[in-house]
Image (cartoon, rainbow, N blue to C red):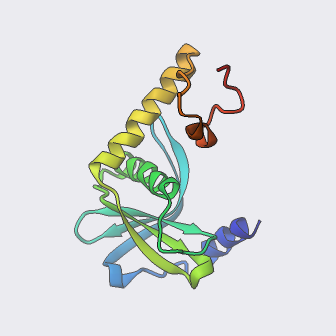
Amino acid sequence: MRGRSLHEDKKTYNKDYLRKKLGVVEKLQEQYLTNRFLRGIVDEVLFFDDKYAAPLDYKFAQYKDKVFNTYKTQLACYAWLIEDNFGKTVNRGFLVYTRSKNKLVEVEIDDDLKNEVKMSAEKIVHIIENNHFPKSTRYKNRCIECTYRNICIQ
């Protein structure tokens, strides 16, 4: 609930604030974006004077010198949506850790990460369209983070 409240506050608080130190020339808040595979609301889409764009996401969390892979994947999804909807190149994203005094962390979003997200989306669509579940792994520790662990027949 605190995270949701934070997002509501960000809609009105510092609405016109641009992160000039980063070179931001324009921003859009709470952007609902879609493409063939994804849809989501990006907290902020930042535009730079060098024709690049970047997602910025607020996290109701503390920064502990590590950016989790789930956060990187989320930024890569947002990057894909921004590229498809605005025709801008995205090569980085930003996280604001609100429980660490709004610490701003820059995250590189390279082509490998974007391609990994795209391949995963295609696999998910294949699973849905063909009602085909992937084979289970021999390594049961991997099941801990698996989306299918509650319905796996293996």
Q: Is residue 36 visible from the viewing direction of this image?
A: no
Residue ranking furthest to the right: 1
Residue ranking furthest to the left: 50
Q: Position of residue 39 (x, y in %)?
A: 53, 43
Q: Which is nearer the eye, 24 or 55?
A: 55
Tally of numbered discs: 0
Q: Position of residue 33 (x, y in %)?
A: 50, 48
Q: Is residue 152 above or below residue 115?
A: above
Q: Position of residue 90 (x, y in %)?
A: 32, 57
Q: Quadrant of the C terminus?
A: top right
Q: Is residue 79 left or right of residue 16?
A: left
Q: Is residue 148 above or below residue 17?
A: above
The residue drawn where x is 53% and y is 74% is 64
Q: Is residue 63 left or right of residue 36?
A: right
The residue drawn where x is 67% and y is 75% is 9
Q: Is residue 139 above or below residue 19?
A: above
Q: Is residue 147 above or below residue 79?
A: above
Q: Is residue 114 visible from the viewing direction of this image?
A: yes
Q: Quadrant of the N terminus?
A: bottom right
Q: Which is nearer the eye, 72 or 92?
A: 72
The residue drawn where x is 30% and y is 50% is 87
Q: Which is nearer the eye, 106 or 139?
A: 139
Q: Position of residue 120 (x, y in %)?
A: 44, 35
